[in-house]
Image: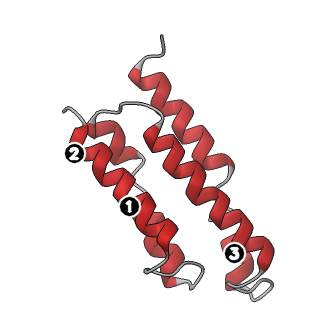
Amino acid sequence: MESGDQALQRAIATISQSDPLIKLLEQVKRGRMTPTDAGLRAIIDSWLGTYKHAIESAEFNRQALRRIDPSPRLVLLIECGVLAEAQQAVADLRESFERAVAAATE
């Protein structure tokens, strides 16, 4: 059975593998890609799904969930125009995170 710390490390690794902030956001900032680029959209959509799955894949405590809170990344992607606040996938990820926090133990 996987410990809470192992599950957290696995979730962080999974989220990091598809993280668009690492390389692609810089391309948008430099004008090499546009926020509406089809390839970028596919990567962002995949990342949102991966993030949601990682949050839902284990029962994390609140401390662990604070470490993988998607809010800072979502805010940055929204500010850069890559995501929209009203986007359903954004709302789904936030709701999933809020449910996990509500169900988590200290």
Q: Identify which residue, 19 or 85, lies in the foreground.
A: 85
Instruction: Work out whether mark 1 precedes mark 2 in sequence or the reverse, and give the earlier one.
Output: 1
Quadrant where the C terminus is found in the figure: top left
Sequence order check: which comes first, mark 3 or mark 2?
Answer: 3
Q: Say which amino acid is labelled 2.
A: Ala
Q: Are marks 1 and 3 in contact (CB under 8 Å)?
A: no
Amino acid type indicated by mark 3: Glu
Q: What label does residue 26 carry, if any?
A: 3
In the rendered image, residue 24, in percent from the top left (x then y), is placed at 72, 70
In the displayed image of the protein, which residue is found farthest to the left? 106
- Report x, y in % for residue 12: 53, 41
Task: Between label 3 and label 2, give the one nearer the viewer.
Answer: 2
Q: In this orientation, does residue 20 appear?
A: no
Residue depicted at x 35% and y 33%: 60
Contact? badges 1 and 2 (CB < 8 Å) = no
Amino acid type indicated by mark 1: Arg
Q: What's the CA distance linking mark 1 and mark 3?
A: 24 Å
Label 2 crowd (10 A; few <14 / some 14-19 / many >=20): few
Give the label on residue 94, or none. 1
Pair 1/3: label in front:
1
SS category of the residue bearing label 2: helix
45 is higher (above) or lower (below) than 81: above
Residue 102 has which mark?
2
Whole-percent x, y for residue 91 in the image = 41, 68
- The crowding category of the residue bearing disc 1, from other C-alpha atoms within 10 Å (few below 14, some 14 to 19, many at least 20), is some
63 horizontally vs 46: left or right = left
Q: Secondary structure at mark 3?
A: helix
Is any atom of residue 105 visible in this view?
yes
User: Is residue 23 found left or right of 81 in the rendered image?
Assistant: right
Q: Quadrant of residue 30?
A: bottom right
